[in-house]
Amino acid sequence: MADPSSYRPKPGQIPDSPGVYKFRDEHRRVIYVGKAKSLRQRLASYFQDLAGLHPRTRTMVTTAASVEWTVVSTEVEALQLEYSWIKEYDPRFNVKYRDDKSYPYLAVTMNEEFPRVQVMRGHKRKGVRYFGPYGHAWAIRDTVDLLLRVFPVRTCSAGVFKNAARTGRPCLLGYIGKCSAPCVGRVSDEEHRELAEEFCDFMAGRTGTYIRRLEQQMTDAAEEMEYERAARLRDDIEALKKAMEKNAVVLADATDADLMAVAEDELEAAVQIFHVRGGRVRGQRGWVTDKVEAVTTGDLVEHALQQLYGEETGDSVPKEVLVPALPDPVEPVQEWLTGRRGSNVSLRIPQRGDKKALMETVQRNALQALGLHKTKRASDLTTRSRALEEIAGALDLDSAPLRIECYDISHLQGDDVVASMVVFEDGLQRKSEYRRFQIKGFEGQDDVRSMHEVITRRFRRYLAEKERTGEWTDGENASSDRTSGDGTSGDGTSSDRTSNDGAPTDGTSTESAPLGNTTLEGDTTGNAFAGNAFTEEDGRPKRFAYPPQLVVVDGGQPQVAAAQRALDELGIDDIAVCGLAKRLEEVWLPHEDDPVVLPRTSEGLYLLQRVRDEAHRFAITYQRTKRAKRFKASPLDEVPGLGETRKQALIKHFGSVKKLRSATIDQICEVPGIGRKTAEAVAVALAQAAPAAPAVNTATGEIMEDEEVGASGTTTGSPEEPVTAGASHERRGQET
């Protein structure tokens, strides 16, 4: 652990101005981001006697190796920059909100030609109207099922919609009256969009208008003796009222407000939020946070508001936000919320009446959530700690392996050979650091050679990052013979751009970055760490910057030997290696003839199995994706500047790739949007490409006619599933 005095700024070096500061560890990772009205006063509080600091603050400052700051003009700018950096760097000591992205929303895709209603999770998209969040997806589906009687909006996927349009037959919902079936032309796109807008209006709380309208229509139908239509309208009214009963009125005057409550102890806090729209509770969500320092309830409220509204604009930010305590100072936060909404937002503590009573209900939910979380976490933390200690004891490690990386090779009969790297920290998945590789050094099936290549490439990048950031200690050789410095593998090919399961690829390079810190609007920036200054990019999680304490390979003695040989060739001797063999679940170690056998009831073995199985899942998912992309490849993919729209235009014009191949350049130019240069490129690409293997109908075994096959090898009879000769599903059983 570092001594905070070793990187403490010199007296008078820190400005007495608003700003945002970052603490970094020895690997240059940003581990904490904070803001302050006065940087001088706030940073000075971190360098007092360690005994007087909060335990988690003490851990943070002793883990850090440097501190730097950015001066801004106003506290609102500081609030915005702090939120941006926390999202970007994901500092380990900042408040963590668990389950933030797990709540389902009812979404209406108004950005599509025929809007559809569906359940959505994750980040919000432009052009989509969201309602919720809801506690469970089934709660959304129950509500939608009732409302589709009155607002028969499309709910099907794009593939189902296209298939219905092609066949001229709607899906089951179209037959039972719960979809207006725009796919077969029962309603126009304008009429369907009007239905979707009415659905959104009802969900937004404007319910009385529709109830009164339907009641009047029911009365008119009864007077005209159209009793069947009147009965249908009666059932529609009952369905709407039943949907409304799921959200009872809790606040009068059709209030739009969010109510937030916090239950906390010394280490953690639970945040609960009720979303009230039109006087009714339309959604509920909750988080559990780790308190990294002695933060007040007002500070927790401020962090929660950042998390809740940081990416929201317009009506998504309500006119009124009710909280248990106000941030100090409250004016910058209120100004920030007003800016997000575009009109005034009231941030206050409820004192009496219905709002006070509802706040007490939210508070009870927060207390229950905190109690339940602590019960679960106590058990989980104990189990994970015991598992890591068992692994350390069985493998004779000096300490528990807090970071474990596992590698697996996947291929299909030697084709599309790929590898995966998954990361577990403190016994939990770290999906943002998952990586995947394409095997480039050779072709064919050789798991041992593939494992050697992957381990070599991964740790070459680690050494390159270590050299670039100046972490070599005295006596270490930082010369180019240890690493090429450009992240290339031993065969001279560049490391592939890797990505995680849903996170974007980190495109950072290993080249030296320009020096200096970021300054906002002409203000000055300071730093307090020895050596060269670094850019903001140095705080981002690099692809291979952080070494594990344990490398696990999916395999037995040969794979373990290959991984150990790769580390030895790179001169790395402080990382342990083991392999977990399938079937017998034996743990193999380098240079050992006999495996280590952990008890079947061992928590350590269970953790290793989870790590191994996750690496296998990640590898085989990537391999299948890569294989599917290859099967759907078209000669037109090789034409520079030819996008999907123009490819489809060519196929639609000529009917098939075969007919397009026989067309002249002048004939290709007749297609709208295709110029002569592009037509020449298309002709060259098709002339150089070999004719594709015939597509096969897996249901009948017959070869499909070329006219039935599009540019991607997809049969017109099955738009969702490309089928190519030699690509039967039975081959999945031979995947590894």
Image (spheres, helix red, strand yellow):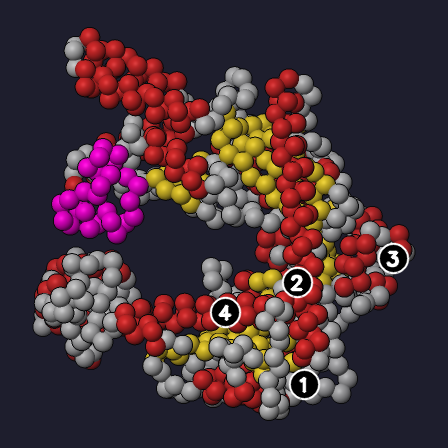
Asked if the magenta segment contains residue 159, the reply would be yes
Q: CA distance from mark 3 to mark 4?
A: 43 Å
The quarter of the picture where the C terminus appears is bottom left
Residue under pointer 4? 613
The answer to whether marks 4 and 2 mark residues whose Cβ atoms lie closer than 8 Å is: no
Amino acid under label 1? Asp
In this view, the residue in front, 605 or 214, is 605
Report the number of numbered marks. 4
Residue type at tag 4: Asp
- Between tags 3 and 4, which lies in front? 4
Q: Quadrant of residue 538?
A: bottom right
Secondary structure at numbered mark 4: helix
Q: Position of residue 347 (x, y in %)?
A: 64, 29
Residue that sits furthest to the top in the current view: 223
Q: Nearer the viewer, residue 673 or 121?
A: 121
Residue located at (72% from left, 41% from top): 264
Q: Is residue 561 above or below residue 513?
A: below
